[in-house]
Amino acid sequence: MRPRRSIVRPSRRPSFRPIAGLLLLAPLAACGDGSGGSRDVDDDFPQAVAAGLAPTPPMGWNSWNEFQGNISETLIENVADALVATHLKDAGYTYVNIDDTWSNKAGRAADGSLQADSGKFPDGIAAVAAHVHAAGLKLGIYGDRGTATCGGYPGSQGHEMQDATTFAGWGVDYLKYDNCNATLNVETQYQTMQAALAAAGTAAGNPLVFSLCAWQFYEWGVATGNLWRTTGDISDNWPSIYANILNNRAYAAYAGPNGWNDPDMLEVGVTDDTFSESTNHTEYQSHFSLWAISAAPLILGDNPTMLANNPEIVAILGNKEVIALDQDALGLQGTQVWASADGNLSVWAKPLNAVGTRGVVLLNAGAAAADVGFTLPMIGLAGGSATVRDLVAQQDLGKFTDAYTVSAIPSHGTATLKVVGTEPARPSGTVDVSDLTWTYAANGLGPVEKDMSNGFSAAGDGTPISIGGTAYPKGLGMAGPAAVIYRLNQACTSFSSVVGIDDSTNGQGTVVFQVWAQDGKDAWSKLYDSGVVSGNQGPNPGAQTVQVDLTGMRRLKLMVTNGGDGASWDRASWGSPQLVCNK
Ligand code: GLA
């Protein structure tokens, strides 16, 4: 059942509570002035899709969630054909990925090369690749960095170049690389396979997508893979699905074209095929919508050959408007911009590749139906009039002013929306950055704080900003990894700030501060890099001064990495960050 929708009266003061209960009886169009605000004619949306192997999150299918060891060349080829027949291929699902148990468990061939299990794949993997390619799709395969895969099949340790050459020679387009039975350094082993894949792919004229499956986020993964698992294995029930997407939030700052956080493959439709229904359709829709707002890889885990019998599942997985939310060319991972005190109700949002446009998912993870609402500043838009569209129903819901609430979202349900309003006003004069509305903010722990340090996960729980013993009444409190984006529209000439680990960590924490800007041709460049800054450097050596020229720049990104050593106590403060703008 679709939630009943309503519009609430304007709330001038952005409120971090859902605004519910004030129903307007007038038709939707009666709200607001109808203009949608002035358009940013000098903004160059849409931005171009990035170049590279994975400019948007990879989409496809993988055998593991539904089939585990029960795979064969017939199955893989039938799945490819089913993706075509169900039009899921047309919707963007491209990679057909064979997971564990495909190889000869008894061992490698005499020359040390990997070989397919001849019972499951009598014609070999190259023949499956040919079938998949003939269907207009791409083939993925599975390997492991250790001595054996998780299922006990041969691992690639010490055979990286040989295996990469084998995969590329077979015409494989994608490698998922697992983490079982490994004792050597994880970073080194993944990087060894990265280099082997690059060399083998170049030699074969067939570059391969590299999917890291190390079951947790590592910062080196960002420079190593095209996607990297951030979590343990997903299973087909709501607690597992919800836990994975929550754990995936902390790394949002690192997501972008050619590098994606992977909260694991989709479970949508998996139990449905066996009609055991451990996850219901409301939860499957929420699973898909949350993956889409999070710019997660969309790798189907169900049985596409059964989908002809299951139009409700096809409707979820094939919904082009929800897929477009995932595949948006800006490549920003949506963040949780508001959560109720108990965490059950939340608002997720991300900027989309059109002026004034945001994707929004309202989630009710609680046990009873509930209203969930948002304000425009919460999603990085100026207050005023905006329009809203339901992406699941593919239906316009009309106009609203300042705030919008969806009533009676069912337990574990979502509303999946596109909002079009007005970008925040460009900065003018000399401005404290903490007084601006950002268009995007990702943070390692709870929200980015204004004029206080980052405390823990709750909003507003920091302390006054203090860097190297000096207090800064104005500033931003982040927890690495973090990224905050502001729209400048070529109105500003410079940015300055003091940066350092906040004194509230008592000497703990290591981060890198970076300042990035996007020029008039959409290219991002790094204008400042602090190097690793530690909290234990004592007063002042830990504080650095940033001053960068922003002439002609469209957007500013303030970034904090975790310093390469995990995110513990990475409270990174920006003291008195200011923009000088002349328009
Ligand atoms: C690990 C991975 C899973 C799957 C299995 C196969 O558990 O995380 O996604 O590939 O191995 O054995």
Image: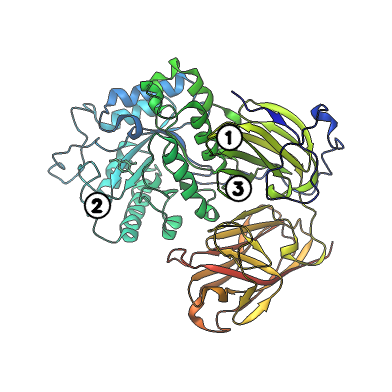
In this rendered view, identify the residue nearer to me: 162 or 151: 151
Cα separation between marks 3 and 2: 43 Å
Q: Secondary structure at mark 3?
A: loop
Identify residue for label 1: 414
Q: Position of residue 231 (x, y in %)?
A: 40, 48
Q: How many marks?
A: 3
| Camera-side residue of 58 and 173 | 58
Q: Quadrant of ligand 1?
A: top left
Q: Nearer the viewer, mark 2 or mark 1?
A: 1
Distance CA(mark 2)–CA(mark 1): 40 Å
Label pair 3/1, CB-CB below 8 angstroms: no
Number of other residues with Cα within 10 Å of mark 3, as a class: few under 14, some 14 to 19, many 20 or more: some
Residue located at (64% from left, 70% from top)? 574
Badge 1 density bin: few <14, some 14–19, many ≥20, Cα 10 Å: many
Q: Amino acid at mark 1?
A: Thr
The image shows residue 280, relative to residue 41, as above or below, that is above
Is 236 on the left or on the right of 20, as rendered?
left
Q: Earlier in the sequence, mark 3 or mark 2?
A: 2
Q: Amino acid at mark 2?
A: Gly
Residue type at mark 3: give it.
Ser
Taking the image as shown, residue 82 lies to the left or right of residue 533, namely: left
Q: Is residue 219 left or right of residue 285?
A: left
Residue receiving disc 3: 340
Pick whichever of labels 3 and 1 is earlier in the sequence. 3
Q: Nearer the viewer, mark 3 or mark 2?
A: 3
Q: Which quadrant of the structure image shows residue 302?
A: top left
Read off the residue under disc 2: 146
Q: Is residue 355 visible?
A: no
Residue under the image location 42 percent in, 66 percent down = 565
